[in-house]
Image (cartoon, grey):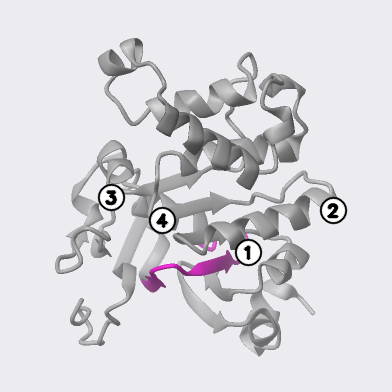
Amino acid sequence: MVESTHGKSIPDDTLLYLDSVTVSFDGFKALNDLSLLIRKGELRAMIGPNGAGKSTMMDVITGKTRPDEGKVLYRQADNSSADTDLTRFDEAAVANMGIGRKFQKPSVIESLTVWENLELALAGRRSPFATLFHRIDQTDEQKISDTLDLIHLAERRDDLGANLSHGQKQWLEIGMLLLQEPELLLVDEPAAGMTDEETFRTADLLREIARERSVVVVEHDMEFIRALDCRVTVLHEGHVLAEGSLDHVQNNQQVIDVYLGR
């Protein structure tokens, strides 16, 4: 990436750049000239009051919503010399480029075992016809086993999804996304509904994942954000209000006035 539409120089290690993105719904600007940069291998937390534009931002990145103005420039690892404008593609195409999204509510198949959910996610990289006749090989088995270890569910591999706790279902869905080998993982409020222990184990999991790929986490739980120990972006009225460490943004007077309320 050389420069944005405003002439700003973009670092070479950029994975994703939202360049002056605006999205309006019935005259309301959900995103208002939003510019945001995510680096390769970065863990980033996104906070902001309801209506700040967090969900709309993820909808734009994943191809669910097309912006009125602006670009979403993405640089894949195997194509380091060119940028792809994601706004020209639909959700399926964006996912195939290496962008995975986890919604707040887990969507595991409760009638299948933990292992079967992961196996199905692995097969999801293939066409429906190929999936029907695919037999898992030793390489795939190892990938699933490694993922089970990462998400702390190796001992639950034969349990039905229905028998997992809420937090374990969240971990399983994260594992299912990881088997599709995304370069960027978007995670929406993963700590919601978790016990304290599950919350901190989830923070550890996301930090571990961020060693090999970029992770963007939208969250309201400040203790969880602190456990992530990463750069924080505060959105307000569809644009970036502040960025920096959690301590930095918590002491920003504008952030206090519009979000933290103290």
Q: Is residue 36 magenta?
A: yes
The span from disc 3 to disc 2 (Cα, nearest Å) is: 37 Å
SS label for mark 4: strand
Choose the circle earlier in sequence order: 2 or 1. Answer: 1
Magenta segment, which residues? 35-53
Give the residue pinned by disc 3: 66
Which mark is drawn over residue 238? none
The span from disc 2 to disc 1 (Cα, nearest Å) is: 23 Å
**Dot 4 surroundings within 10 Å: few (below 14), some, or many (20 or more)?**
many
- Asked if labels 2 and 3 touch by Cβ distance under 8 angstroms, the answer is no
Please report the residue visible at 52 percent of the width from the left and 79 percent of the height from the top.
241
Choose the circle earlier in sequence order: 3 or 4. Answer: 3
The span from disc 1 to disc 4 (Cα, nearest Å) is: 24 Å
Give the residue pinned by disc 4: 184
Q: Is residue 224 left or right of residue 208?
A: right
- Is there any visible trace of residue 25 in the rendered image? no
Please report the residue visible at 53 percent of the width from the left and 68 percent of the height from the top.
44
Q: Amino acid at mark 3?
A: Arg
The span from disc 1 to disc 3 (Cα, nearest Å) is: 23 Å
Give the residue pinned by disc 1: 49
Count of numbered badges drawn on the protein:
4
Which mark is drawn over residue 196? 2
Q: Is residue 62 left or right of residue 179?
A: left
- Asked if labels 4 and 1 touch by Cβ distance under 8 angstroms, the answer is no
- In the rendered image, the residue lying farthest to the front is 138
The span from disc 3 to disc 4 (Cα, nearest Å) is: 19 Å
